[in-house]
Image (spheres, rainbow, N blue to C red):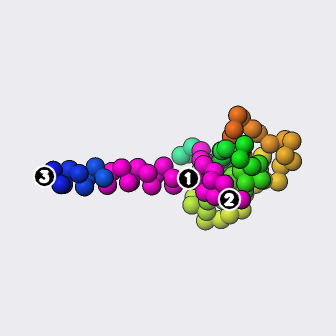
Amino acid sequence: MRTVLLITCATLVLASCTRDRANVHAFNGVNYRGKVSSTRADRQHFVATVSPVSKGLEGAIEAGRYEGTKHCIEFYGTSDIDWVVGPDTPQDQLRLDGDALTFQGACAG
C-alpha cells in the first residue's frame, strides 16, 4: 500500500511539472512562457501574452508569433493571422506590461 501511494504521488508531481512547462518555449536561447486567451464563443479573436521580455525583445516577439500561430492552427487549421498588434508592429508601438508582451489578432479563415 505504501509503495502504491509513493508511486501515485511521484506520478502527480511529474505530471504537474510537465503541465507547467507546456507553454514554455525557447527562442534565441531563452525560455519564454506564453499564453493565449479567447472566449469559447469566439476563438477566432485572441490575445497572446509572453514573458519575460527583459530576456530579449526579439525572442519574445517570436514567442508571441508562435503562440498565436499555434492557437489558430488548433482551432482553425490555418496559420494565417490578421494581427491588430503583432510581430510586424513597430517595436515602439508594442504593448508591454511590466515584463510581458501582449499581441492581439484574429485567425483568418
Confirm whether the magenta stretch covers residue 1: no
Helix, strand or loop status at disc 2: loop
Label located before the other in sequence (3 or 2): 3
**SS at badge 3:** loop
Type of residue at label 1? Answer: Asn
Specify the label residue 29 is tagged with: 2
Which residue is nearer to you in this view: 59 or 49? 59
Callout 2 amino acid: Gly
Q: Which mark is residue 23?
A: 1
Q: Is residue 96 above or below residue 60?
A: above
Residue at image point 48% right, 49% down: 20
Residue at x-position 71% and y-position 59%: 28
Residue denoted by label 3: 1
What residue range appears in magenta? 11-37
Where residue 80 appears, x then y in whole percent? 71, 62
Asked if labels 1 and 3 touch by Cβ distance under 8 angstroms, the answer is no
Secondary structure state at the residue bearing disc 1 = loop
Residue at the image point whose x is 38% and y is 54% from the top: 14
Three-letter amino acid code of the residue under disc 3? Met
Query: Toward the viewer: 93 or 25?
Result: 25
